[in-house]
């Protein structure tokens, strides 16, 4: 993977297709994030800390144009949100954001400083902080500062756009989630590079120490790669591993395959809140022309693939046809899923969404649609919070409704419900 180089006296580096894809997702996500969290018209202030831990120099060359890099995207999207959200409001909304841009290369932070200066941003350490250091060394101070500014939730987005797969200590991501309950992390992870280099050698074991992969797990991954499961199984195991070690309840991986190296990169969104995951998955549907993933509607891997003309046809495109296919697939799979989720006792709609979120490309609204269809077909019952069965003409689920197996499945005289 090419590593970008910036210097204040030189033109910025050229951007490649796959990096553009990453920037598109980030921009779309930030836009939706501001909108989704500010639907309440009576809110008058919104605090957010944006941390770009591997910020780079701020801009790229895109043929004859200059294209914003991640730090500028954070600033531009805040400004855009400020205008957009205030357009229809009687009571003005104040967006109070603080930005931290960290890069280990002094030439990169100097370039970034120049770019921000030229665009009129004041880098005074008050609202915009630029630090020339390793992210790992700056992280503790930043977490403490976010907590000081926002003691209750620590609402923050950490973008960790590393090169490779082992610069970001996963225990550091776990610490972010432990200390800042409303934090989200977007992590670049060169999954295929890791899979290609998999080896039970001391050098590899040391190289992946930041990922908390034990020697036994590495042996397991090698066995998976060489066995029937192949690459897909290793990817699945890695994805689950990252979620487990970081303590993120939800992940949404964008799968990016650069044309040159053909090695898949993940742009992995990690969060502890189901709504954050739903906002990210919605972006996949919105950017449907660009993003693809392997599998059916009951997917395990989301993705974007620049090898449009490869011999492996994309299986899932986030387009209308695939939406229909996914609904059909979900209709097939959901009864089994719901049966196992509700076999002991009814579960709430909210809990069902949380359980299924990491396993499918479906938005919560898609899952709800299938649940309602199964309810109309009498395959399941929907109970109100007080335990009464809802009318079969129900049009919308509430998060507190509960999903139950139909009582009629049982022998006369018995009831599944308590
Ligand atoms: C992929 S580039 C970032 C590109 C940028 N996010 C964008 O898209 O506009 C990765 C950057 O991380 C920096 N870097 C490498 N190791 C680092 C570390 N341990 N801490 C902070 N920055 C680091 C590199 O100098 C490089 O500028």
Image: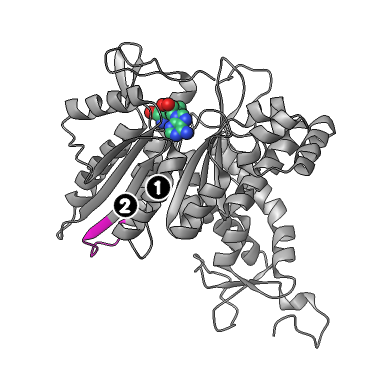
Q: Is residue 44 magenta?
A: yes
Looking at the image, residue 197 sits to the left or right of residue 259; the answer is: right
**Ligand 1 placement by image quarter:** top left
The residue sitting at 80% across, 40% down in the picture is: 220
Tag 2 residue: 48
The reply to whether residue 410 is visible in this rendering is: yes
Q: Are marks 2 and 1 in contact (CB under 8 Å)?
A: yes
* Residue 301 at x, y percent in the picture: 63, 39
The residue sitting at 31% across, 52% down in the picture is: 48
Looking at the picture, tell me which residue is in the foreground, 93 or 375: 93
Q: Tell me if residue 400 comes above or below residue 246 in the rendering.
A: below
The reply to whether residue 68 is visible in this rendering is: no
Residue 314: which quarter of the image? Answer: top right
Looking at the picture, tell me which residue is in the foreground, 311 or 249: 249
Question: Quick one: quadrant of the C terminus?
Answer: bottom right
Tag 1 residue: 157
Q: Residues within 10 Å of mark 2 (few under 14, many from 20)?
A: many
The residue sitting at 56% across, 76% down in the picture is: 390
Which stretch is magenta?
38-46
Q: Is residue 392 magenta?
A: no
Real-space CA distance between mark 2 and mark 1, rounded to the nearest whole angstrom: 8 Å
Question: Which of pointers 2 and 1 lies earlier in the amino acid sequence?
Answer: 2
Q: Residues within 10 Å of mark 1 (few under 14, many from 20)?
A: many
The residue sitting at 36% across, 59% down in the picture is: 147
User: Of helix, strand and loop, which one carries label 1?
Assistant: strand
Looking at the image, residue 99 sits to the left or right of residue 253; the answer is: left
């Amino acid at each position: 993977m090419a590593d970008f180089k910036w210097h204040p006296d030189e033109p910025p580096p050229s951007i490649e297709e796959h990096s553009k894809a990453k920037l598109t997702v980030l921009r779309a996500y930030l836009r939706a994030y501001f909108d989704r969290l500010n639907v309440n018209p009576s809110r008058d202030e919104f605090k957010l800390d944006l941390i770009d831990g591997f910020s780079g120099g701020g801009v790229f060359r895109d043929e004859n144009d200059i294209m914003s890099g991640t730090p500028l995207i954070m600033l531009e999207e805040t400004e855009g949100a400020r205008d957009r959200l205030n357009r229809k409001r009687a009571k003005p909304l104040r967006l109070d954001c603080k930005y931290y841009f960290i890069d280990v290369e002094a030439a990169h932070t100097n370039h970034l400083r120049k770019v921000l200066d030229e665009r009129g941003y004041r880098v005074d350490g008050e609202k915009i902080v630029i630090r020339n250091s390793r992210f790992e060394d700056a992280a503790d101070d930043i977490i403490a500062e976010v907590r000081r500014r926002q003691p209750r939730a620590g609402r923050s987005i950490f973008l960790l756009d590393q090169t490779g797969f082992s610069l970001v200590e996963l225990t550091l991501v776990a610490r972010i989630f432990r200390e800042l309950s409303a934090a989200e992390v977007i992590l670049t992870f060169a999954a295929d590079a890791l899979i290609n280099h998999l080896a039970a050698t001391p050098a590899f074991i040391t190289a992946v120490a930041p990922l908390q992969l034990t020697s036994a797990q590495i042996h397991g991954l090698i066995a998976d790669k060489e066995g029937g499961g192949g690459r897909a199984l290793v990817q699945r195991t890695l994805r689950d591993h990252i979620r487990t070690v970081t303590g993120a309840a939800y992940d949404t991986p964008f799968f990016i395959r650069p044309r040159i190296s053909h090695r898949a990169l993940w742009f992995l969104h990690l969060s502890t809140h189901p709504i954050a995951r739903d906002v990210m998955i919605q972006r996949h549907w919105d950017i449907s022309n660009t993003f693809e993933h392997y599998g059916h509607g009951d997917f395990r891997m989301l993705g974007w693939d620049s090898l449009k003309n490869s011999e492996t046809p994309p299986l899932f495109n986030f387009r209308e046809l695939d939406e229909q296919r996914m609904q059909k697939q979900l209709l097939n799979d959901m009864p089994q899923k719901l049966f196992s989720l509700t076999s002991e006792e009814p579960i709430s709609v909210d809990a069902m969404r949380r359980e299924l979120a990491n396993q499918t490309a479906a938005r919560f609204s898609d899952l709800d649609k299938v649940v309602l269809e199964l309810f109309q077909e009498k395959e399941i019952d929907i109970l109100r919070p007080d335990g009464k069965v809802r009318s079969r003409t129900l049009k919308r689920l509430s998060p507190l409704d509960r999903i139950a197996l139909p009582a009629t499945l049982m022998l006369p005289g018995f009831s599944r419900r308590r």
